[in-house]
Image: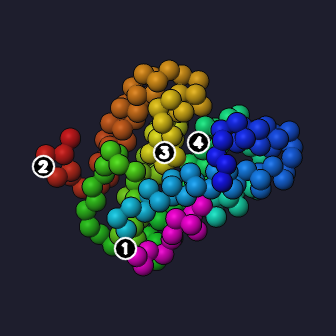
Amino acid sequence: MNTDPSAITRLLAQCREGDRGALDALIPHVYEQLHGMAEKCFRGERESHTLRATALVHEAYLRLAGSEVDWQSRAHFFAVAARVMRRILVDHARSQQRQKRGGGAWKLSLDDTPTVGAEKPAMMVALDDALTALARMDGRKSETLEMIYFGGLTYEEAAAVLGVSVPTVQRDLRMAKAWIYREMQKDGPEPPAGDG
């Protein structure tokens, strides 16, 4: 499949101009990258997990197709896709939490892409709550973290979407990670010795 960025940009421009069929034409161009984003979320999970990467991509497509977004660029598309996938993952985690209440400590690591195992719905929900709180306080930092960790965007792509420099993205990301970690530790267990 042709994943030429100019073809993606052209199709996004057609979407912006109201061509509803352009999004359908766009999906084959971006499917592989969307699937890669989804697979990162499921790394290390058991085979019997109730949500699969393909299902996540398909649900994201349905939500994207039903949205009225003014697509600005390829990076903007993937940033919105990341937000949609995050929303689906959080909804799934909340559903799992309702079905199975349980304790157990969890460890937060924003050095890797978050995973969504059935044993981790409390962490996913807590992460979503913390990101929502951060968004109210500083939307750009929340968006930066979301684009990089859920969307897999590069620093350069995130900078383009946000209209800031790469060093600003790096600084915002460091601050967001520290803030999220502190916020999640307020209600969670004490971090293990040696974690920083």
Measured as percent of width and height from the top left, residue 16 is found at 80, 39
Disc 2 marks a residue whose amino acid type is Ala
Judge whether residue 51 can be spotted in this image. Answer: yes
Q: Which residues are magenta?
A: 47-57
Q: Specify whether residue 169 is painted magenta.
A: no
Q: Nearer the viewer, residue 45 or 69?
A: 45
Which residue in the protein does label 1 denote? 46
How many residues crowd mark 2 within 10 Å: few (<14), some (14–19), many (20+)? few
Measured as percent of width and height from the top left, residue 62 is found at 70, 61
Q: Secondary structure at mark 1?
A: loop
Residue placed farthest to the left in the image? Answer: 193
Q: CA distance from mark 4 to mark 3?
A: 9 Å
Which residue in the protein does label 4 denote? 79
Mark closest to the chain's N terminus, 4 or 2 = 4
Disc 4 marks a residue whose amino acid type is Ala
Mark closest to the chain's N terminus, 2 or 3 = 3
Q: Nearer the viewer, mark 2 or mark 1?
A: 1
How many residues crowd mark 3 within 10 Å: few (<14), some (14–19), many (20+)? many
Position above or below: 47 against 36: below
- Report the disc number at residue 193: 2
How many residues crowd mark 1 within 10 Å: few (<14), some (14–19), many (20+)? few
Position above or below: 117 against 26: below
Which residue in the protein does label 3 denote? 152
Q: CA distance from mark 2 to mark 3?
A: 29 Å
In contact (CB < 8 Å): disc 4 and disc 3 = no
Mark closest to the chain's N terminus, 2 or 1 = 1
